[in-house]
Image (spheres, rainbow, N blue to C red):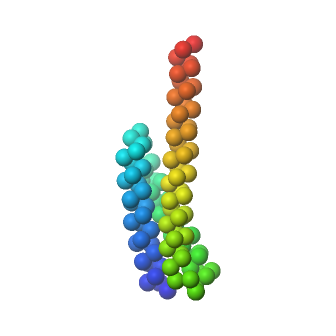
Amino acid sequence: FILSLLNCYIFNIAIVLMFSFVISSVTKERAFLEEKKITCIAWLLGCIAGTLWKISYPASPYLFYIISSSCSILTFFLYVFFTENIVSIMRIVTNKEKKH
C-alpha cells in the first residue's frame, strides 16, 4: 500500500515538473517564487487526491495515478487561465488609462 503511494507521488512529481517546464516556457512574465509555489501546490493537491482515492477505493490498482496526475494538471490549467486573464485585464486597464 505505502509503496504504491510512493510510486504515485514520484509519478505525480514527474508530471508536475513537466508541466512546470512547459508553463515557464510559455509564460515568461512569472516570477520564480510564484512558479515554485504553484508547482508545490499542484504536487500537494495531486498527492492528496491520489491518497484519498487509494484509501477510498483500494481495489482499483492504477486509477489513482490518473486521478492524482489529473488533479495536478487541472491545477496548472486553472492557474494559467486565471493569471493570464488577470494580466490581460491589467494590460487593457493600463492602456485605457494611458490613452485618457
Q: What residue is shown at x 52% (from left), y 36% (from top)? A: 87
Q: Decide if residue 31 is in sight here.
A: no
**Among the 4 quarters of the image, the one containing residue 55:** bottom right
Q: What residue is shown at x 42% (from left), y 56% (from top)? A: 19
| Screen quadrant of the C terminus | top right
Does residue 25 appear left or right of residue 82 in this picture? Answer: left
Does residue 79 appear left or right of residue 15 in this picture? Answer: right
Q: Residue furthest right?
A: 56
Q: Residue furthest top?
A: 100
Q: What residue is shown at x 53% (from left), y 57% (from top)? A: 75
Number of numbered callouts drawn: 0
The percent coordinates of residue 46 (x first, y second) are 52, 66
With respect to residue 57, does 90 lie above or below?
A: above
The percent coordinates of residue 94 (x first, y second) are 53, 24
With respect to residue 94, does 40 lie above or below?
A: below
**Among the 4 quarters of the image, the one containing residue 86:** top right
Q: Decide if residue 12 is in sight here.
A: yes
The percent coordinates of residue 9 (x first, y second) are 44, 72
Q: What residue is shown at x 59% (from left), y 76% (from top)? A: 53
The percent coordinates of residue 77 (x first, y second) are 52, 52
